[in-house]
Image (tube, rainbow, N blue to C red):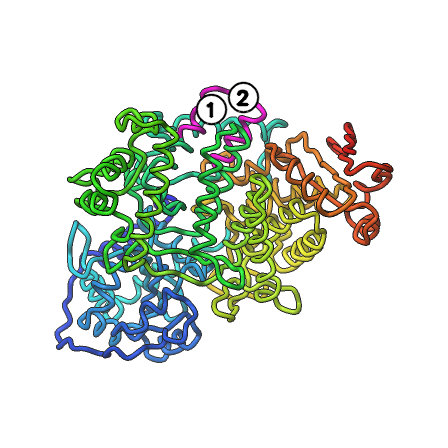
Amino acid sequence: MRWFQMDRRLQSPQFIQTSLFLITHINPLQRGLGITRGSMPNRLATSTSPYLLQHQTNPVDWYPWCEEAFELAKRADKPVFLSIGYSACHWCHVMAHESFESPAIAQILNEYFVSIKVDREQRPDIDHIYMQTVQMLTGSGGWPLSVFLTPDGRPFYAGTYWPPTERWGRPGFNTILNAVVDSWKNRREPLLSQANELTHHLQPKPPSEPTPVSSNWEKNSIERADQTLAESFDSKHGGFGRAPKFPHALDLRLLIAIESHIPSEPRLQRITKTLDAMLQGGIYDQLAGGFARYSTDDRWLVPHFEKMLYDNALLVQSYLDGYLLTGNQRYAEVIRQTLDYVLSDLTDVLGGFYSARDADSEGVEGKYYVWSREEILQELGQERGNQFCEAYGVTFGGNFDGMNVLYEAATLQQVAHTSRMSIDSVRQQLAEDRLRLLELRKSRPSPSLDDKVLCSWNGMMIASMARAGMVLGERKYLAAATHAASLIVNQMMSEEGELKHSWRKGVAETTGFLEDYAHCVEAFLVLLECTGEHRYLDQALRWMECIESQFGDESGGYYFTSKHSEKLITRFKDDHDGSTPSANSVMTMNLVRLARLIPKSPWLERAERQIGWMRQGLPRSTAPYGQFLLAVDYWCGPTSEILLIAKDEDTLREALIATMQKYLPRTFVIGVVANSREHQRLKNGPLADHLHGKELPPGAKVVTYRCIENVCHDVQLST
């Protein structure tokens, strides 16, 4: 979550007075509070969202986001209470148990509000708009997101988590509700004025005159980002900034790209210390693999236990880059363990990747993942149990509420010295003991699974799975990537070629957003490189044309929602990276790669236009632009294309793997089987220039052409 300062234009006396009144004013409702609903399902019971289904038996008379809810609010002259969260969110669960399951609070909501529940993952467009509201009002944001709206959807007050009654310096949710009710009845004009003001500031700013930039602004921006990350680096524990500490996967990829061009020992240490610290810490699941959302402390020890698909997809890419840069086999192990976790726990039988695994089980955060020393000694015995506890920092006192989050507390050498065993024997015993404890852990009540398939997040994981399959020489990962890609094409795309955002149990819904198209294009370009199957390029180009027609803006950038999406109170463009890369940043990389791959095409002009629009934000800060600067680095070049022509599919596969097992951040790989039907077709297609005059010589198994800036410099034959 990004942090912002309150917009100075929103600090008018009337604006602040209204906000303070809503926070502090108490006017208790003088009426009896009883149960308004039993355990009968409410309107959320028919939803495909696991998050909404979690609330289907609340006594709150929830509506999903729909026109019916706003029409009711208009007819009844009631404000709307909008609650946005997601299924794996710990504090969303807390507010649900404390407030939304409370008959007393439900009575207030049902009598005086129309209440709407939204899954932020299914509707990122709604979430983005109203998250901006709370950020403008408070300077920060998060989930659960709680917003009060007029019946036409304009926000007039917002916050995040509120306890049911005043606690920790926060006003109680009941206090907030009563104050809003009183203000809506008796002081409505200030609320409406505030709604107008907030809605005005949510509108896109008119295009500004292009800011003059130096001829080497690209180099300066990348250097500035490198310096900014150096200044925020935690030299003691690795990572950037302070607790809560996030992985910064995109920034790590940027640093690795810079390091490959301009080696620097201090930068390399920042990269490796961060990668090492995360895999050794509690943020990494030492038994099953996979990364939790973030660390609550500086040491990467105690995670926020939810596991999100996108975090793991992005971190796999970071560790792949780190592995190719350094050759550190430990990074390869982490990639395998993480992807194996995704395949075993987050993969649908039809190939799609699920969204998340919750942080809570039986209502307790982290309960599924933590251990007592007694449990481990009982399972493993005294000798091996003590060895395991030394290796993974398990004590009788614990490091998390009296229990233990596992982390690498000692090296293999240290454990071997204590145990008087060889390092290989210790490594083998610890591997066996991890499996035993993992099986024991599986017998516990598991955290809930969010089994919806999101198009954008699947695009990220497809790219990671496919690339890992080549880098590690593991066919199962590439097979998983192609399987998931088939689900998107067959289950999440209309006959007209337009994507749906969300899929669950055979039902695809919600018009696709820019992030869906952008990440799917990225994934299909990676699949083209990894498989040599050019149908992936054809589909990626069709989606790119759809993006231009449905999301494009002549003034620059791309809207988050398409022309066919539901009309909300504003239509925005996202350019700042958050927990995931901004869709416009991903689009920049897509455009840059296509411009270099197909130079005689409109993509070159579109890439230049996109970079010009995106760079307007760079004079302010490079911090949330990691993905964009990766694209800028690619754009700066020199770029290269590697063309492989092989005698048959098996030879091509081997050649592709050998090629992609090198770190090539500014390179596109093209593979084709000589004289195949596809080879002949491609000679007249978008890659014709790359194939013109290039053939497999007689007697050769494979020929490799390496072209730099569209000029071939190297030809290698394998016989």
Element class at badge 1: helix
**What amino acid is labelled 1 in the image?**
Arg
Identify the image quadrant of residue 487: bottom right
Residue 268 is one of the magenta-drawn residues: yes
Q: Which residue is mark 1?
A: 267
Which residue shows up at 64% across the image and 39% down it? 657
- Is residue 5 at least partly visible in the picture? no
Report the Cα–Cα distance between label 2 and label 1. Answer: 8 Å
In the displayed structure, does residue 6 sit left or right of residue 501? left
* Span of residues in magenta: 251-273
For the residue pair 444 and 643, the one nearer the viewer reads as 444
Q: Given contact means CB atoms under 8 Å apart, are the residues at marks 2 and 1 in contact?
A: yes
Which residue shows up at 74% across the image and 38% down it? 643
- Is residue 113 at least partly visible in the picture? yes
Element class at badge 2: loop
In the displayed structure, does residue 565 sit left or right of residue 33? right
Mark carried by residue 263: 2
Q: For mark 1, does the 10 Å Cα neighbourhood hold few (<14), some (14 to 19), or many (20 or more) residues?
A: some
- State the image coordinates of residue 188 (x, y, percent, origin top left): 29, 67
In the displayed structure, does residue 190 sit left or right of residue 482? left
For the residue pair 426 and 580, the one nearer the viewer reads as 426
Identify the image quadrant of residue 429: top left
